Image (cartoon, rainbow, N blue to C red):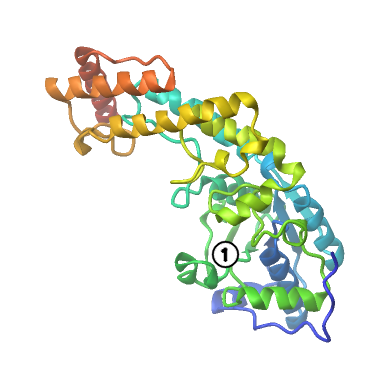
Amino acid sequence: MQIAPLRAATAPPISVDPEVRELLGLNAPVAMGISGGKDSAAVAFATCDYLDNIGHTGPRLLIHSDLGAVEWRDSLPACERLADHLGVELAVVRRPAGGMMERWESRWKANVDRYVNLKCVKMILPWSTPSMRFCTSELKTDVICRELVRRFPGRAILSVSGIRAEESARRALAPISKPQKKLENKTHGTRGLDWHSILTWSKADVFAYLRAKGFPLHEAYTAYGCSRVSCTFCIMAAAADLRAAATCADNAEIYGRMCELEISSTFSFQEGGWLSDVAPHLLTRDQLRRLPRAKSAAKLREKAESIIPAHLLYTKGWPTCIPTQAEAELLCTVRQTVAATLGIEVLYTEPAGLIGRYEELQETKDNHR
């Protein structure tokens, strides 16, 4: 869908600070991270316009981290349209070990193994969360920074993203720029900054600017009525956006795969909200049959683990004390309940063995100091 052009592509000013100006004065490479969504399109247009206006002649690059099966069908094409429109190279990078779905699935497998072997006291969820966004750090920032370091040895690099202060209280505190440690590489001689060039823009500013540019928006907005574009089903998405994403036939396969992990793990995709409830008509008969049991199992698991005293939990992956006999008996009861609820077999379900495991881990921790 082409947006009707306006007379001029007016926009609020770009946010720039002295650190950014210094690097731009050196014609530093500027890499603009894009996802296919409105904010990344706006940041690419506005940043390129600004670079043109100041006479910047350094390298420019659009870079997209493809998260695999969780991506909208139109995300990569939207990035390609943007690159073609701007006449700027597009680099597409991917996590070598697989996309977001593979990361969640492998995390769950690893977490079950950790619980079996008492490397954690409570079962750990497979999903990323708003406070634990390894989806961003591992599958976007890490992968993008590695590529930029490879491409621009010996340079100071500006990595641009389209975050806006209006989006959240946390982003309202974001600076215009900040050092990006993952761009620091002694071997390649690189350093760099994250630059938030449209930090002060509102959502209305973004849409008006893209209308003025006459740039076609992602189909998630135009065909399905989503308010934002990220993964098809995002841990931070509003309920309305999850429902909208489920109306796209292309998303049915990944929806079923995500719901399968939700049901088998007994951890809801979002805190207090089951993705499986968003579009139950897309679930298989088997998934529909198992869903109520998964919800019941989640409550049983949470109730069982709620009685664990805080001092028996690990800190940074290690115990801080050795359980008493009574505490060991309690932990064994919890482990037996959780194991039965999830249908897994676990070790250390007898007090003597559990205390011995704590002592073993404590000794290992002490030896690593």
Q: Is residue 208 above or below residue 349?
A: below
Q: Check disc 1 and report its element: helix, strand or loop.
A: strand
| Residue occupied by mark 1 | 193
- Picture coordinates of residue 114, whole percent (x, y): 40, 25
* Residue drawn at x 76%, y 42% as measured from the top left: 250
Q: Position of residue 297 (x, y in %)?
A: 41, 28
- Name the quarter where the N terminus is drawn: bottom right
Residue 254 placement, left or right of 107: right
Determine the residue positioned at 78% across, 52% down: 74
Residue in the picture at 50% in, 49% down = 133
Quadrant containing the C terminus in the rendered view = top left
Viewer-side residue, 59 vs 281: 281
Above or below, 47 relative to 286: below
Q: Position of residue 87 (x, y in %)?
A: 86, 65
Q: Residues within 10 Å of mark 1 (few under 14, many from 20)?
A: many
Q: Quadrant of residue 356?
A: top left
Q: Is residue 182 visible?
A: yes
